[in-house]
Image: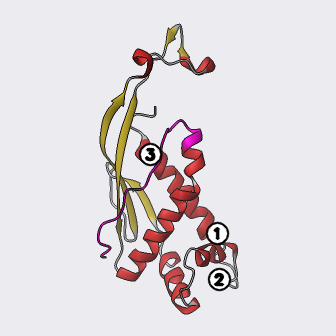
Amino acid sequence: MMSGIADLHMLTALQNGWKQIEAGKDAAEPFAGYGYTNFARMFPGISNDIRKEWWTGLVSKPVHFRAHAAPGHDDFPVVVIQLLSETPVDAPLGHYSMKGSEAVFGSKKLSSAIVRQSLLLSMMTNNAEITRALFVVVRSILLSYHKQFLKAGYLEFSYSGAEELTP
């Protein structure tokens, strides 16, 4: 289900999640707001001074989230989501699908297949510590949207690791 658009679903989740985290950045007390409180919870055991430095670095300029094929360019920090591959895994019931009234498109029954989609997220910033903080935030947002991905019809939503974090 959702063939070929998993990157757009992830993009939407990241954009919405970032709006929630960023909330309150312009408050009179920028480190007392809802957004900073949620941000700080992502970094247990890290000194408050470091968390404030990371928070300031992330909210001082807008973080851009974009699909890799979107036209144009953005300034750093930017997170680019790319659909790398889509591999058929199974054809349940000979590609026949029946899920309530959604399974009929006009007078035709829908067919189905189970596919595994791999996505790549590339995070670019001007500072290695901001890259680290952004990585933790992105991973936290995606974990918080896990149930929504499953409700949308994805059978599995898993994290398979990270490469070296460099600016």
From the top left corner, tell me how far across and down residue 127 is, in percent: 36, 81
Residue drawn at point x = 37 percent, y = 71 percent: 76
- Disc 3 target residue: 8
At 32% from the left and 73% from the top, the residue drawn is 165
Disc 3/disc 2 C-alpha distance (Å): 31 Å
Q: Is residue 43 above or below residue 112?
A: below
- The amino acid sitting under disc 1 is Ala
Q: Which residues are magenta?
A: 150-167
| Residue 127 in sight | no
Spot the residue most to the top: 107
Image quadrant where residue 122 sits: bottom left
Name which residue type carries label 3.
Leu
Q: Compared with residue 159, is residue 167 higher up or lower down, i.e. above or below?
A: below
Q: Tell me the SS state at disc 2.
A: loop
- Per the rendering, the mark at residue 85 is none
Q: Quadrant of residue 166?
A: bottom left
Q: Do the CB atoms of the residues marked 3 and 1 lie less than 8 Å apart?
A: no
In-front residue for pair 123/117: 117
Residue 114's x, y, as percent? 41, 30
Calculate the distance from the C-alpha at mark 2 to the C-alpha at mark 1: 10 Å
Work out whether mark 3 precedes mark 1 in sequence or the reverse, and give the earlier one.
Answer: 3
Assess whether residue 5 is covered by the magenta stretch. Answer: no
Tell me the number on the disc at residue 23. Answer: 1
Disc with the residue nearer the chain's start (2 vs 1) = 1
Q: In the image, what residue type sits under mark 2?
A: Pro
Few, some or many C-alpha atoms within 10 Å of disc 1 (few <14, some 14-19, many ≥20)? some
Label disc, if present, on residue 30 of the rendered structure: 2
User: Dot 3 lies on which element?
Assistant: helix
Q: Name the image quarter holding the C terminus.
A: bottom left
What residue is shown at x 41% (from left), y 18% (from top)? 95
Query: Disc 3 vs disc 2: Cβ atoms closer than 8 Å?
Result: no
